[in-house]
Image (tube, rainbow, N blue to C red):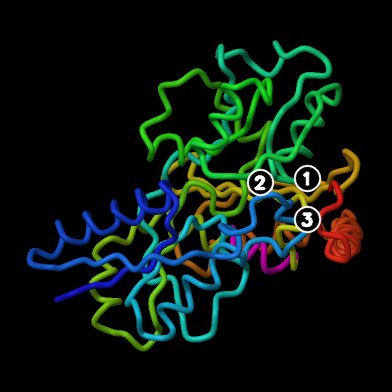
Amino acid sequence: MKLRIATRKSKLALTQTGWVGEQLRALSPGLEVELVHVVTVGDRVQDVSLNAIGGKGLFVTEVEQAVLEGRAEIAVHSLKDMPAELAEGLCLGCVPKREDPRDALVTVDGCALDDLSAGDRVGTNSLRRTLQLRRLRNDLQYAMLRGNVDTRLRKLEQGDYRAIVLAMSGLRRLGLADRPLQPLDVLESVPAVGQGALAVEARIDDATTLELLSKLEHAPTRLCIEAERAFLSALGGDCHTPLAGYAHFPEPSMMRFDGLVGAVNDTRVVQAGSQHYTRTASVQEARQLGIEVAQTLLDDGAGALIEEARQSAEAAARDPRRPT
């Protein structure tokens, strides 16, 4: 059997896709894997904030199209790049075991956030990260940082930034987690929905491929992702909104969910958490927990913050090269 995998061409995307291919080959001896390279809008536009040009779909849409058009059987994405709703005709064929979901503060010398000096420049293109870091250190200068992981690290090393913030999962997958860095606690910097997990998409009607992918499914990760995506969908949030949602199992039979929604231009935030014992560890229970936390946030005013973010995004879209 031959399996064609659609993927972006960045080093991280190819590393992640290569890992999925290796795992599937190990689980299905004789499987032949071919990579189908796709260049997305997010890859082509590197000098503008993602918030200004469309958000998550920028790294996903063209890759999904390769599957929908039959040029590939599956697509591999970083799950945090996935919008709340998948393209019609596609499904999450499997969710492999999650990597480290934390954010990491990366510096040349490995200093912690508290050790930075007032006015130091910190690079990140994430509204979510900027909001949460401002709540911890509002005296730092937060600046846009685009590009692949190597490009971002190079800008750090040449002194453009005193520190940058990256996902621990990407650093681990690229073999770069041994460099000077400080992981941020998930309660200080709540991860993005899906951060650290991979999404393997396939066509809903491709039973042969879905059966193959089922061998790579990791049930606890699936439950956490279902909770997080239900949370995202219930809020109606997107990349224009500083939004975080993280589910995990502090005990084998207990799922905890922490979520927040923040303002775009200041440090206002609404935050909530909840945990439930899972009787059957079902997808329905997981989704309900995410929806419960989302409703708590909406009751506490998250809707107004999300609407502010949309209006700000619309203004940025009218002038996408203005600072955001």
Kindly identify which numbered label has been placed on residue 36: none
Q: Mark 1 vs mark 2: which is more N-terminal? A: 2
Q: Please state the extent of the stretch shown in magenta in the rendering.
A: 228-235
Q: Mark 3 vs mark 2: which is more N-terminal? A: 3
Q: Foreground mark, 3 or 1? A: 3
Kindly identify which numbered label has been placed on residue 271: 1
Q: Quadrant of the N terminus?
A: bottom left
Is residue 234 in view from this perspective?
yes
Please name whichever residue, 19 or 70, is drawn nearer the observer in this view of the structure. 70
- Residue 241 on image: x %, y %: 78, 55
Q: Identify the residue shown where x is 54% and y is 39%.
A: 167
Is residue 280 in view from this perspective?
no
Given contact means CB atoms under 8 Å apart, are the residues at marks 1 and 2 in contact? yes
Marks 1 and 2 sit apart, C-alpha to C-alpha, by 8 Å
Identity of the amino acid at label 2?
A: Asp
- Residue 222 on image: x %, y %: 43, 60
